[in-house]
Amino acid sequence: MLFVAWFAFTARKFATLGPTRRAPARIEPITPAHVHMPGGSAAPIAVAFGAGFLFAGLVVGGVGLVIGVTILVITLLIWFREAIRDYAHLEPAQSLQRLPAVVHQGPPPGVHMPGPSIRPLMGALGTAALLGGLVIGGWVLVLAVVFLVWTLIGWLVDFSAEYRKVEEADKTGHLENIPARPLPLRTLQVFAVAFALLALWQLGIFPPAAPATAGGPGASPGATGAAGPAGAPPGALTVIAKGIEYEQKTLEVGAGKPFTIFFENQDGASVPHDVDLHSADGSQLLKDQPTINGGTSKAYQYDALQPGTYKYICSVHSIPAMTGTLTVK
């Protein structure tokens, strides 16, 4: 409210200020030759409002989120259209003339201007690979860490070489940049193929494997009994993980009685999972269970619970697909 009052007061003050120029009309400033001075733009303010609507939609959700995204996209398109107009003014499409190339004579004495570097882009790729590895886990995560470390070491090597050039300039008075580093396409292709093969192998997609059954790979396929899958203790609940997802996302048990969850991991052999018990909001860990690798199964024991709602989550892949709700009545 204070801000609104101050804004209204300031707007009224400027609106009633009256003319202050002595000249009959405003004198437009003249831009120096070969210098591009774009005019004022309301697009950044519009995009800021669009971002505000987006964040409000994230809080409200549902239709509010759709409206927020739509408003942000519209404001970005307005800004993009304005930028295209500005660029078209610089480079007329109907003319073969181009602006004269601006050749800089170099930085002032004592100022070091490093050349362009591919390392920030490589660091961003390494960070993206690490985030993807954290989602998939296993050997993909290991390869992602190796890729990120490789990009950071390359950045450190370039930085060290650049620093040595600066030290040499202190003695010679002549500053040189290190050679430009090209994009390592061959190495990136090798890493991309390795990531794809590891992900397919870890998810159990390639090479194709026989479906896992309760009791391990050697158990009889499809054997089930009254109490659940083969190997499950009598009265145990069943949870199956396949494709990095729980097939059973809702369970129900009686209050005041210990219970058992028979867990089958039907993912690839290198994909570990478990079934940890959490509070209703997922913030408090109530029962930590050991992980098991793909193609195996285990009976997890849990203590008696009070009536209410709880969460069971995979500690390795704590994503919505591997989160379920346990109702205790």
Image (spheres, helix red, strand yellow):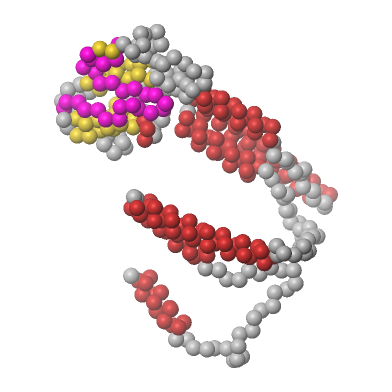
In this view, the residue farthest toward the front is 94
Horizontally, residue 186 falls left or right of residue 271, namely right
Residue 266 showing in the rendered view: yes
Quarter location, residue 283: top left
283 versus 275 height, above or below: below
Between 213 and 158, which is closer to the camera in this rendering? Answer: 213
Horizontally, residue 104 falls left or right of residue 157, namely right
Measured as percent of width and height from the top left, residue 282 is found at: 31, 36
Residue 288 showing in the rendered view: no
Measured as percent of width and height from the top left, residue 156 is found at: 66, 39
Q: Which residues are magenta?
A: 226-255
Quarter location, residue 86: bottom right
Measured as percent of width and height from the top left, residue 197 is found at: 56, 25
- At a point 31% along the width and 11% down the height, the residue shown is 223
Residue 247: in magenta span? yes
Measured as percent of width and height from the top left, residue 164 is found at: 75, 43
Horizontally, residue 329 falls left or right of residue 244, namely left
- At a point 47% along the width and 21% down the height, the residue shown is 204
159 versus 216 height, above or below: below
Q: Give the quarter of the figure containing the C terminus.
A: top left
Please, what is the dominant secondary structure of the magenta stretch? loop
Q: Give the quarter of the figure containing the N terminus.
A: bottom left
322 versus 24 height, above or below: above
Quarter location, residue 278: top left
217 versus 308 height, above or below: above
- At a point 42% along the width and 26% down the height, the residue shown is 243
